[in-house]
Amino acid sequence: MIRTRTHVGSRAAVGGLISMLAISLTGCGALGGESGSSSSDGTVTVWQYYGDEQMPTGKPLYDALEAYDAENDDVKVKIRFIPFEDFNRTLQQGAAAGESPDVALINAFDTQQMADAGVIEDISDKVEEWGEKDAYYPTSWETTQVGGKTYGIPHVADDYALYYNKDVFEAAGVQPPATWDEMESTAATLAKEVKYGLAVSGREGAEGATGILLRQLAAGGDLKTFGDGTGAAALESYKRMVDNGGLSKGFLTWLEDDAKTHFAGGDAAMMINSATYVNILRDEVPDLNWDVAPLPKDEVSKSFLSAENLTIGAGSGDPDAAWDLIAHLQEPSVLEEYLPARNKLPARDDVPKAVEDPIRKTFADQLENAWAPEGDVATHSNESLTAIQEALQATISGGSSPADAAKAAQAKIDGALGS
């Protein structure tokens, strides 16, 4: 799931009500919910968008925080779930009202925006004293940096790989594609065995840009340079897959959940998706014979990092208690239990047993070389991703040539970035 503004966790939250579980129920704020802390009172407030305690995306965090609460008699933890689409606005309103949470679990790519807005605290001194920076994957750590200062700690990570149906591959006599050229021919071959050779999200909005961005990254570009030729090459590649039957034109209406549904149901021989779906497939279709391969490469081999950062809210009444909680959540022994339950990958490389599962290891190995937007590109990634999905739509529908569509997307990206 592309962690810009849409993702599985957020979609699970869409339509939900603001829900709160207060491990210790005290006080209500002016925002109509649990207030943040403006003074030290032994309570650590945590705002997050994963989900409520009933949701599979939210329950593991509640369990981890409840365990911390039980182990620390002098601290009470209060958790507030805010749906993803409301989270940043609510966080900013809380800061303006002097009711920031002590701990905010934010989208990693929003870190600069929140730091620039004065919504989260500079924690460089705490991190320096902590001394565990080098345990983190470089791309994950970079998402915490703003102007040379540290504003968060990477919480978990996720990225994309190629799921494939082993039985369909065996029947067709093919191997998982190692390059995008092989992907195009393999998808066409597999489409003769099942309904779709490849399933990937292409729907309107940022999530639908996942596949085309991954293809462009492999061509050597990135989100800021979609119009430099790599974007056009990626668009041409997807158009060839639609033209040769390997990819249904209907993928322009698919979310990542839809791609999963086609793969889980046996209609698709391959899908590009995140590690989020590993446990889901195991639970939903335990008899499906599938595996995961690294994403195909072109000029380079690269995946896309999806992540969240733990931050301290500006004006926290007890930043030391907030930091203690953040550091606890990042202890390898805590992550060892938490990550499988949360269905995520570690953002650091020293978590025991975190990647012993060979399928999870395939995802984790790609974290070493994952790409993530930085700086202004991260701040405006939603607009930029939407622009390249529109280019994909224009190309596949025949409304524009790949080159013209890429140029149009670049103009929108430049406009978003003010360049």
Image (cartoon, rainbow, N blue to C red):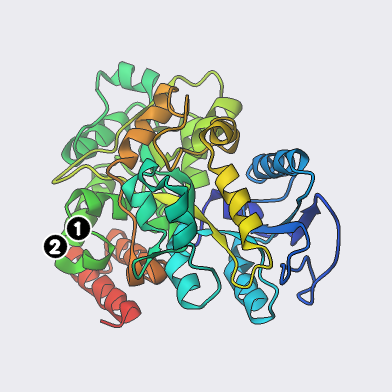
Task: Choose top left, top right, bottom left or bottom right for residue 187.
Answer: top left
Question: Could you tell me if the residues under marks 2 and 1 are in contact, i.e. CB atoms within 8 Å?
Answer: yes
Q: Can residue 386 be seen in this view?
A: no
Query: Callout 2: helix, strand or loop?
Result: loop
Look at 19% across and 58% down and name the residue there. 221
Percent from the top left, x then y, of residue 1? 46, 49
Which label belongs to residue 229? 2
Percent from the top left, x then y, of residue 335? 54, 36
Look at 86% across and 61% down and name the residue there. 26
- Compared to residue 298, the image places residue 224 above or below, namely below
**Nearest to the observer: residue 188 or residue 343:** 343
- Compared to residue 134, the image places residue 224 above or below, namely below
Q: Amino acid under label 2?
A: Gly
Percent from the top left, x then y, of residue 405? 24, 69
Query: Callout 1: helix, strand or loop?
Result: loop
**Nearest to the observer: residue 76 or residue 116:** 76
Look at 20% across and 63% down and name the residue there. 402
Residue assigned mark 1? 221
